[in-house]
Image (cartoon, rainbow, N blue to C red):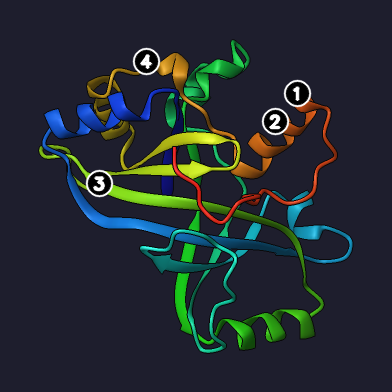
Amino acid sequence: MEIEIKLRVLDVSALRLSLKRLRAREISPRTYESNTLYDTAANDLTRRGQLLRIRIETPGAKGGRSRPSRDAVALLTYKGPPRRSRASKKRAGKSKSSERFKIREEIEVTLTGWKQLTEILLALGLRPTFCYEKFRTTYVLPGIRNLKAELDETPVGCFIELEGSAAGIDRAAKLLGFSRGDYITQTYGALYLDDCRRRGAKPAHMVFHTTKKSC
């Protein structure tokens, strides 16, 4: 079961200083991610709150315009409908802000041959519906077990994603200078649509328009 939140990062230099002060350890270097969501023509998965995604990672990449090789490793992810946290259930009906965390069933498998995998999904009647890119650097914080802090550089801004236990997330967010009011439970797809509405732009895919991106 995945429990996570996002936090919008307005000052990445300050965040990196905070991570250094907390003696955070980098366990995965800056990695380019190409993500593609799949659904049926009738958007059955979306209507049920489910997600099916293929992710291809390229460590150390400076841009996402190069096409991966046919036998590149792919991460296939299924996510179930979002669930409420136990704390949220106790306060149900009082405030939507009480739903502090995004909680979803998550099943992942690593496969060699992303091209063959996409061909299987297409043969089953699934189609790509949304693509998004980001650069991710992953850290762990000493003293907080089983928690990952992932700095994401995206076309709609920079975020740090905290994944772990509810208590671990609360503690890490506080140590990094955030409050519970800063918690974001939206997906990157939803954040992208919000950004398009603010700019009056027509939604397409959340991709970089240059070959290099850095916050």
User: In the depicted view, which residue is nearer to us: 25 or 11?
Assistant: 11
User: Badge 4 is on which residue?
Assistant: 179
CA neighbours of label 1 inside 10 A, class few (<14), some (14 to 19), many (20+): few
Image quarter of residue 132: bottom right
User: In the depicted view, which residue is nearer to us: 12 or 145?
Assistant: 12
The amino acid sitting under disc 3 is Tyr
Q: Is residue 172 above or below residue 138?
A: above
Q: Tag 1 or tag 4, which sits nearer the N-term?
A: 4
Q: Which mark is residue 195?
A: 2
Q: Please give left or right for residue 123 compared with residue 176 in the image.
A: right
Q: Please give left or right for residue 131 compared with residue 35 in the image.
A: right
User: Badge 3 is on which residue?
Assistant: 139
Q: Position of residue 182 (x, y in %)?
A: 45, 19
Report the Cα–Cα distance between label 1 and label 2: 5 Å
Q: Tag 4 or tag 2, which sits nearer the N-term?
A: 4
Report the Cα–Cα distance between label 2 and label 4: 23 Å
The amino acid sitting under disc 1 is Arg
Label 1 close to label 2 by CB (< 8 Å): yes
Label 4 close to label 1 by CB (< 8 Å): no
Q: Position of residue 213 (x, y in %)?
A: 50, 47
Report the Cα–Cα distance between label 3 and label 1: 31 Å
The residue at 32%/43% (across/down) is 164
Mark 3, mark 1: which one is toward the viewer? 1
The amino acid sitting under disc 2 is Asp
Q: Tag 3 or tag 2, which sits nearer the N-term?
A: 3
